[in-house]
Image (cartoon, coloured by chain):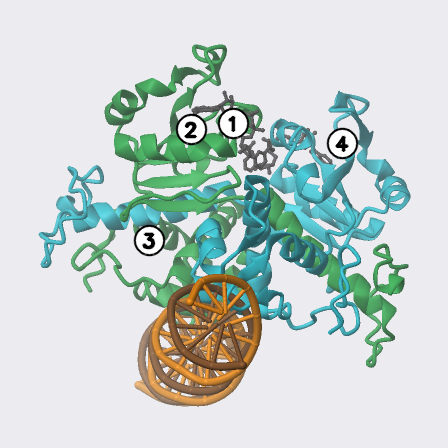
Chain colours: A cyan, B green, C brown, D orange
Amino acid sequence: MSQQRNGQAAGVSDGAVFPDLPEATVARLPEYLRALHNLAETGFDTVSSEGLAAAAGVNSAKLRKDLSHLGSYGTRGVGYDVALLIAQIEHVLGLTQRRAVALVGVGNLGHALAGYAGFSSRGFRIAALFDADPGRIGERINGLVVHDIARLPEVVAAEAISIAVIATPAHAAQSVADRLVAAGVTSILNFAPCVLSVPDGVDVRKVDLAIELQILSFHEHRKSALTTLPSPTGDGSMKIRPTLDGEALAT
Amino acid sequence: MSQQRNGQAAGVSDGAVFPDLPEATVARLPEYLRALHNLAETGFDTVSSEGLAAAAGVNSAKLRKDLSHLGSYGTRGVGYDVALLIAQIEHVLGLTQRRAVALVGVGNLGHALAGYAGFSSRGFRIAALFDADPGRIGERINGLVVHDIARLPEVVAAEAISIAVIATPAHAAQSVADRLVAAGVTSILNFAPCVLSVPDGVDVRKVDLAIELQILSFHEHRKSALTTLPSPTGDGSMKIRPTLDGEALAT
DNA sequence: AGGCGTTTGTGAACGCTTGCACAAACTCAC
DNA sequence: GTGAGTTTGTGCAAGCGTTCACAAACGCCT
Ligand SMILES: NC(=O)c1ccc[n+]([C@@H]2O[C@H](COP(=O)([O-])OP(=O)(O)OC[C@H]3O[C@@H](n4cnc5c(N)ncnc54)[C@H](O)[C@@H]3O)[C@@H](O)[C@H]2O)c1
Ligand SMILES: NC(=O)c1ccc[n+]([C@@H]2O[C@H](COP(=O)([O-])OP(=O)(O)OC[C@H]3O[C@@H](n4cnc5c(N)ncnc54)[C@H](O)[C@@H]3O)[C@@H](O)[C@H]2O)c1
């Protein structure tokens, strides 16, 4: 309603905090945010839905509908104010303050994550590292010391940690998740290839590299199968390469 | 139709190769496959849709509908033959032969990926590593030598690579993608936080860690906002902790 | 002030996805 | 062989997400 511009959170906290934002929209807001930051660095003050949609790689109608869920922050005939929209999305995503994140499992992958600069530039701070290997405990990585996993409750409470990343082997992941939940963590990002069971109220998202590759593999499989059948409509845009699968031929 | 059991691909390649498999189903097949492998190692010969659904973390009706798209590979009153279903899903996903994957950008993350054992156990083989940094070229990682990115066309052709992983900084990713496509790669898994533009016929999937965390952050934000309002239905399962956001209070 | 080109916000239609519920099909015991 | 119990495969309806298309709103130029 009132358009005062006292930094972020301009006249938004007057109602509920978007209890019914569609999940698909939530998943895209971070993409818009990244695109907006790029635009801001490039010097843009405003951007049209068409322009932002292109930068984020989505349909412009979808973008407008997504943003309309947050309220009316665009100006017809002009577009969206980049800085205002950044502040608005960051507010909705709860990024107005930097969130503390715990990382459990400082192995191969964990080391890379611990040293990743993209965390802090996008609203997060790795606040603590944990491992169970006595040989790893005490090691310093990027200014952080690796704690014994036994100290989880203590450190989680002290650092006000609510989000954790699991980068342990799969066989340890459920046990780690249980301990995280017991320590008060309510959001988990899981890199181990297994399903985690957690109580209601705890969110889990997973990243499984092999699954992504297998989905790509399916489409590769489908593409190479198409080259074996003469296309009824020779569209010409498909590059016909010798099939590497050689499987449909084996019948 | 005919139920001969000549290893994998039993009487399937007689039609088209699943041109209309729903995308949501394709994304879940790898989950089922992983769960099935676990079950097979645990000694299960058959599994019910209920059991497999629980192991994969999905609804059993959804699982049955997904599998029904592949054909009838279950036995009513019994369940699914684990080994047969594994072979079937692997066939559909195009995993009957190990696929060669190129990895571009052997930095922090790339090192972890290059040493990851989960690739080879799930149908893939890292066939080549590439980087642009002269200091990195020639380095040996896990038995593989890091090639100059300039040798991309040559190596991609020699190793029959159709899938590539991009683990370079974001500012280099589009250029790398262009070179990959030019070299004949038709599927890309992108870890750089940026949108890639590729021609039709090339598939891109992205993994963005910060996006996952920001989605979790949204739900954290929503949860902590709920604790400030007295819940109309005190369900008791929600653990009320002092709000760490302190933002809804600032109004 | 008024008209014109531009862009947002959104109603409505469409397609995809999910979940229920149940008949058909199978095994096993006797 | 028959009946009881179990589990698959699927029609159907409800929900969710996407896209189109357009009126309302805005800036700008005259
Ligand atoms: N390396 C990759 O590129 C990659 C890619 C995708 C997924 N993953 C998955 O990420 C996970 C980690 O992979 P990695 O290559 O880093 O493995 P890793 O073996 O190198 O590291 C695992 C770490 O977890 C620690 N750990 C084991 N049990 C623990 C416990 N109970 N509590 C705390 N810490 C414990 C180990 O001490 C070790 O430091 C695995 O599940 C793997 O499948 C890895
Ligand atoms: N490190 C992580 O945990 C992590 C997590 C999520 C996403 N990412 C993303 O993954 C990417 C890599 O991250 P990183 O931490 O490994 O960065 P890094 O700087 O450690 O490694 C990047 C590597 O890419 C190489 N490179 C640069 N330009 C190249 C080009 N044109 N062709 C080929 N190689 C090139 C560099 O020489 C370097 O070896 C980044 O986009 C990052 O945002 C990293």
State the CA–CA distance, disc 4 to disc 1.
Answer: 24 Å
Disc number for residue B88: 3
Q: Nearer the viewer, residue A34 or B81?
A: A34
Amino acid residing under circle 1: Gly
- Residue identified by numbered label 2: B103
Helix, strand or loop under label 1: helix
Does the beta carbon at disc 4 come under 8 Å from ligand 1?
A: yes
Helix, strand or loop under label 3: helix
Badges 2 and 1, same chain: yes
- Residue identified by numbered label 4: A132
- Residue identified by numbered label 1: B110
Residue A43 placed where, x, y %? Answer: 57, 42
Label 4 neighbour load within 10 Å: few <14, some 14-19, many 20+: some
Helix, strand or loop under label 4: loop
Q: Nearer the viewer, residue A73 or C30?
A: A73
In this rendering, the answer to whether A210 lies above or below B149 is below
State the CA–CA distance, disc 2 to disc 1.
Answer: 7 Å
Looking at the rendered image, the disc whose residue lies closer to the viewer, 3 or 2, is: 2
Does the beta carbon at disc 1 come under 8 Å from ligand 2?
A: yes
- Tell me where residue A186 sits by quadrant: bottom right
Does the beta carbon at disc 2 come under 8 Å from ligand 2?
A: no
Label 1 neighbour load within 10 Å: few <14, some 14-19, many 20+: many
Are the two marked residues, 4 and 3, in contact with CB atoms closer than 8 angstroms? no
Are the two marked residues, 2 and 1, in contact with CB atoms closer than 8 angstroms? yes
Looking at the rendered image, the disc whose residue lies closer to the viewer, 4 or 3, is: 4
Amino acid residing under circle 2: Leu
Badges 4 and 1, same chain: no
Are the two marked residues, 3 and 2, in contact with CB atoms closer than 8 angstroms? no
